[in-house]
Image (tube, rainbow, N blue to C red):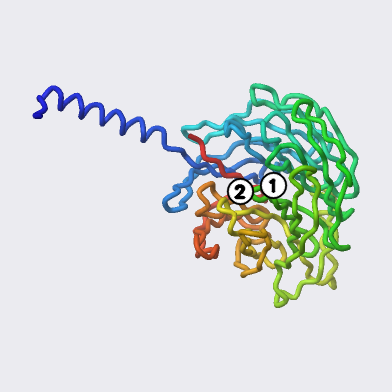
Amino acid sequence: MKMTRSAAASVALALLLIIGVTSMSVAKTFVYVSNAQDGNIDGYVMDTSTGALTPVGKTEAAKLVMPMTVSPDKKYLYAVIRSQPTRVLTYAIDPATGALAQKASAPLPDSMPYVSTDRTGRYLFTASYGGDKLAVSPIGENGLVEADAIQVIATGRNAHAILPDRSNKFVYATTLGANQVLQFTFDSTTGKLTANEPPAVSPDAGHGPRHMAISADNKNLYVLNELSGHVTQYAVDAAKGTLKLIESIGSVSAEAGLAWGVPQAPAGTAAAAAPAAKDDKPRIWAADIQIAPNGKFLYSTERTSNKIALFTVAADTGKLAYVANFATEAQPRGIKIDPSGHYLVASGEKSDRLSVYKIDQSTGKLGEPSRYPVGNGANWVEIVDVP
């Protein structure tokens, strides 16, 4: 049947409208990096076809802005200030441009080097390395953190990270100095954490649990140990939320010549700024850990050798196999993988550049990096897809 001119024009207009709506609804990918020494946050738009970053601009925060996390609904960025007065800032994310606008500020009970949210986005978790404590703060229905913590829990020495499992029924926290991973049950109605039974598990002495990553199937928790550089795999009991140590795999090659590390002084203190003794051996100082979205690869950073380690993850058991190390920015503090799993972004606390690596989807190996300007003391990296 032959179409009339008016009908053809209507179809063409409808197609143009569909194309326009589709193009407008394409998600944008934003990258945020906290610059501890500058006291601000750098923002970028990522081109997910190439990994290229285009600066959005700098957003003011405060000195020692470090850990950050994004709300589950991708509308807000939470940034923790570790200088006095210690607090958390809530920023609204502009879905069109990626620009940040501060909407709230709330006190925290101590200097907190780690922040995360529960899976509903109603509660904010923080951990204090220098204060040996964990805290739970309420997040309002408007997405803002505006009130004091509703629960503060004393821990063993050097609480370093706190993370919920994917069921939102259990929460884990690391204590570097006490060499433990704490286990809690979580009530998402009240926000209360309760010690599980047993309340903690431990790797061998001296490892120093630091940061964590949980597998997409919620069956395994991986803990990066700051002092040994090992990644420890714990199997998660789905019913009880308790952990069972499976094995620990080294991330630092023997050729690096590094001795196991010792606990560091809290950031921002005089002891942290003091130079190491001249005869001190170079020591392992691991920092961050991330799992690729496809679950096949795991990465960790080591700050003394300036390297990113790659592990493969066995599909059936979750066991790790060390593959290689890749050179990266000076004193690599933060890494993050974009939601597509194609790019890894790395920051260095002693570098004025970010590195963006393309991930080989069959091997996990990192390609030659593209590098982009960033502020002083680049620390935490967050990447978010916003529809």
Residue 353: percent from left, percent from top: 57, 55
- Tell me what residue is drawn at x 76 percent, y 33 percent: 87
Q: Residue at the spot x=85%, y=73% of the render?
A: 279
Quadrant containing the N terminus is top left
What SS does tag 1 mark? Answer: loop
Residue depicted at x 76% and y 60%: 232
Give the vertical position of 323 relative to 168 (above or below).
below
- Label 1 and label 2: CA atoms lie apart by 8 Å
Could you say which disc has been placed on residue 375 in the image?
A: 2
Amino acid type of the residue tagged 2 in the rendering? Gly
Total marks drawn?
2
Relative image position of residue 203 (x, y in whole percent): 84, 59
Q: Position of residue 84 (x, y in %)?
A: 80, 36
Closer-to-camera residue (28/38): 28
Image check: 300 left or right of 262?
left
- Residue closer to the observer: 384 or 298: 298
- The image's mark for residue 377 is none
Mark 2 or mark 1, which is nearer the start of the sequence? Answer: 1
Q: Residues within 10 Å of mark 2 (few under 14, many from 20)?
A: many
Q: Are marks 1 and 2 in contact (CB under 8 Å)?
A: yes
Is label 2 in a helix, a strand or a loop? loop
- Report whether 251 appears left or right of 382: right
Residue 80 or residue 374, whichever sits in front: 80
Tell me which amino acid carries mark 1. Gln
- The answer to whether residue 176 is above or below residue 17 is below
Q: Residues within 10 Å of mark 1 (few under 14, many from 20)?
A: some
Residue 80: image x %, image y %? 72, 38
Kindly identify which residue carries mark 1: 37
